[in-house]
Amino acid sequence: MIERKTRLYTAVLMPDRTALSMEIALGVAISQYPTGTFLTATADRGKEFACYANLETTHSLHVYFADPYSSWQRGSNENANGMLREFFPKGTDFAQVEDEDLARSLDLMNHRPRKCLGW
């Protein structure tokens, strides 16, 4: 997940791509921030977002869906995912990735100078 204004990127390891795993992962991510920090979320059309109604009621969140094959509607997220691939190349088995490795990668990404943030 990426916050659009500050470009803060957050990721949580999930055991699989089920709706239940997504619901738990999003709950973990949201619980790390003050109430009301997350107001909306834009998701792709993956099966893991089948729990969107529960997410909306549980976390007072509005979930929007990008159109099929329209990755540009989630440009910030796609860009951040590309940066994460610098640390974990395509084909990486995330079951083998430790929480500490992910946290270290996120820290480096979130402290990277960016043009859109005035370097």
Image (tube, helix red, strand yellow):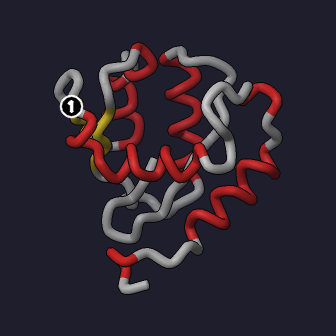
Rendered image quadrant of residue 109? bottom right
Check disc 1 and give the amino acid type.
Ser
Residue furthest bottom as drawn? 118
Q: Quadrant of the C terminus?
A: bottom left
Residue position for label 1:
70
Q: How many numbered dots are placed on residues in this image?
A: 1
Which residue is painted at 46% across and 47% down in the image? 1
Specify whether 1 is left or right of 15: left
**Vertical placement of residue 16 versus 106, above or below:** above
* Residue 94 image point, x, y percent: 72, 29
* Residue 102 image point, x, y percent: 72, 48
**Vertical placement of residue 54 versus 102, above or below:** above
Specify whether 18 is left or right of 69: right
Residue nearer the viewer, 109 or 42 = 109
Rendered image quadrant of residue 43? top left
Which residue is painted at 63% across and 58% down in the image? 106
Specify whether 27 is left or right of 93: left
Which residue is painted at 59% across and 43% down in the image? 85
- Mark 1 secondary-structure assignment: loop
Rendered image quadrant of residue 112? bottom right
Q: What is the crowding at mark 1: few (fewer than 14 residues within 10 Å), some, or many (at least 20)? A: few
Specify whether 39 is left or right of 98: left
Which residue is painted at 37% across and 77% down in the image? 115
* Residue 24 image point, x, y percent: 58, 30
**Vertical placement of residue 24 versus 48, above or below:** below
* Residue 20 image point, x, y percent: 54, 18
